[in-house]
Amino acid sequence: LGSAERGWESENGRAWKALADQDGFLRLLPEGRPDPTHADRHHWNDCRSDIDNEDAVSTEDDVGFIAALLDRVTAEFDVDPARIYVTGASNGGMMTFRLAMQLGQRFAAAAAIIANLPDPSECPLEAAPLPFLIMNGTADPLMPYGGGCVAGSACRRGRVRSTDETVSFWVGVNGAAGAPDENALPDACPDDGSTVTVFAYSGAAGNDIILYRIDGGGHSIPGPEATPDSGQAVTRKNRDLDAACRPAAS
C-alpha cells in the first residue's frame, strides 16, 4: 500500500536490506498504481472484484508488469532463475497470492503477510504447487483473520476469505496430507500483547505450507522495534520475531 521508497526505509525494509547485504542477493521493490488522493499510497490489482472505492481499485496489468521486471532483472544481473522469491504485505500480500498463482513457475517460493485470498475473486483461483509462508494476526481489523470485509464493515475495499480457508487452498494445491506440526514460539516480548504459533504442513515434493498465526497481532509486520502506536488494536505489532529473518518453523 505504501511506496517502494517507504518500504525500503521501513524497519522491515532495513531488515531485508541487511539480509541482502549479508547473503548477497538482489532485492527488487516494484511499485503499484499511485493513489490519486495520497502521494505515499499505491495499489496493486490483487483480484478483489468488489472494491467500491475508485481511489483504491486498480485495473493495471500488474502481472505483466512484474513479469517484465523479472525479465529485465534476470537479463541485466547475475540472477539464478531457480532462486527467485516473492513476498508482500497487506495489498502486497494479496498481490503475492496472485503472482504465485499466475507466475508461479517464475518463483522458488512465496510469502504473504497480513493478507488473505479475495472473496470473490475476479481471477481464477488455480495454482501449481509452490512452497508458501503465510503470516497473519488474529486481531487484525483491516485484514480480518476470520474473513469478511477489508478495512471496515462497509466493505468498500472488498472481502477476503479467512486465513484458515486461504491456508486450506494452498494445502490442497500442494498436496499436503495430515495434520500440521504445531510449534509455539517463545513469548520473547510479553508486553507486545501477542504470541506466535507456527503450523507446518508437509506438502508433496517439498512444497510445504507454513502458517505463522500471530495470536493478538494486528495489521503490522512482526519485528523487534517498538513503535509509538504498537499497542493499538489496528497496528498491534508482535515483537517476538523478525518477519524477514524467521521464515522457518523451528
Image: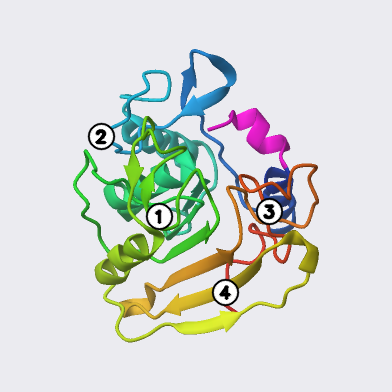
Cα gap from disc 1 to disc 2, whole angstroms: 25 Å
Q: Are marks 4 and 2 in contact (CB under 8 Å)?
A: no
Q: Secondary structure at mark 3?
A: loop
Q: Nearer the viewer, mark 1 or mark 2?
A: 2
Q: Amino acid at mark 3?
A: Lys
Q: Are marks 1 and 2 in contact (CB under 8 Å)?
A: no
Q: Amino acid at mark 4?
A: Thr
* Magenta highlight range: 1-10
Q: Looking at the image, is 162 positioned above or below residue 210?
A: above
Q: Classify residue 13 by image quadrant.
A: top right
* Frontmost residue, 126 versus 167: 167
Cα gap from disc 1 to disc 3, whole angstroms: 29 Å
Residue count near mark 4 (Cα–Cα under 10 Å), binned few <14, some 14–19, many ≥20? some
Cα gap from disc 4 to disc 2, whole angstroms: 32 Å
Cα gap from disc 4 to disc 3, whole angstroms: 15 Å
Residue 117 x %, y %: 34, 50
Q: Residue 107 got which mark?
A: 1
Q: Which residue is mark 2?
A: 49
Q: Which residue is mark 3?
A: 237
Q: Nearer the viewer, mark 1 or mark 4?
A: 4
* Frontmost residue, 110 versus 144: 144
